[in-house]
Amino acid sequence: MTEMLNFKDVELFYDHVYALKGVSMTMQQGEIVALIGANGAGKSSILRAITGLRKIKSGSISFMGERLDGINAAEIVKKGIAMVPEGRRVFPFMSVKDNLLMGAFTRTDKAEIAATLESILTRFPRLKERYHQQASTLSGGEQQMMVIGRALMAKPKLLLLDEPSLGIAPKLVQDIARSIVAISRDEKVSVLLVEQNSRMALSISKRAYALSTGSIVLSGDSKSLINDDRIKAAYLGAEV
């Protein structure tokens, strides 16, 4: 497999407070990799560093062999990285259609954009049913499907998902999880998944990194980690 993402000794601060302390991690093309840990562990900071929303203090970030750190956020999107932020961030007074099309702002290939849109509506039939409705009228789970679809409109090589199960009904969490696996498989998109729902994240990912206070404390094959007593005690005990 080809290496897609390489984090090497990355340090990041928020107002002189460590957010990431010498974090190193890698990701191969085609993988689903999970980042698990409690609130404030540094998971979202990794995504912000990748997308250029936060400048790193030291270390390096490479994507497909090219350095990302130091490049502005718009250029990073053009390289094939799309993020679905925590909290969904929909355009509430725009239709589902227009929300989805916002994801294609870097593209000019009208026929290909139309084909991508059709494939997303096929993947998420609820969005097709609500195509002309305002985004604010959708349920939380439907909005999550829409923002994932919006990110896919950019035709990314790497999809960053920040807490996709947050605030979603349990039944729809299963639908979202299945969709992530199918998207990675069918669209040949690599996925970096940030989740507090560790059981879900470990069940659908190939590998995982567990973070605590800005550092990676455990990493490895997800199937092994889900049975690791340290992971069970720290992250899986209260989950169903």
Image (cartoon, rainbow, N blue to C red):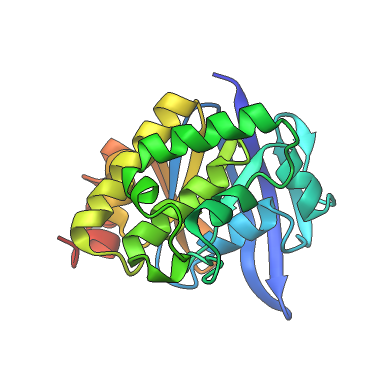
| Identity of the residue furthest to the left in this view | 240
Who is closer to the viewer here, 12 or 142?
142
Who is closer to the viewer here, 29 or 217?
29
| Identity of the residue furthest to the front in this view | 132
In the drawing, does residue 86 fall left or right of residue 14? left
Q: Position of residue 111 (x, y in %)?
A: 64, 27
In the drawing, does residue 218 fall left or right of residue 171? right
Q: Position of residue 183 (x, y in %)?
A: 42, 34
Q: Is residue 221 visible from the viewing direction of this image?
A: no
Say which residue appears at 27% left-offset and 42% top-offset: 203
Check the picture and name the quadrant holding the N terminus: top right
Q: Position of residue 152 (x, y in %)?
A: 54, 41
Q: Is residue 76 visible from the viewing direction of this image?
A: yes
Say which residue appears at 63% left-offset and 62% top-offset: 21
- In the rendered view, would you say 76 is above or below 171? above
In the drawing, does residue 24 fall left or right of residue 108? left
| Identity of the residue furthest to the bottom in this view | 15
Q: Position of residue 232 (x, y in %)?
A: 22, 56
- In the rendered view, would you say 174 is above or below 1? below
Check the picture and name the quadrant holding the C terminus: bottom left
Who is closer to the viewer here, 20 or 48?
48
Q: Quadrant of residue 33?
A: top left
Say which residue appears at 65% left-offset and 38% top-offset: 6
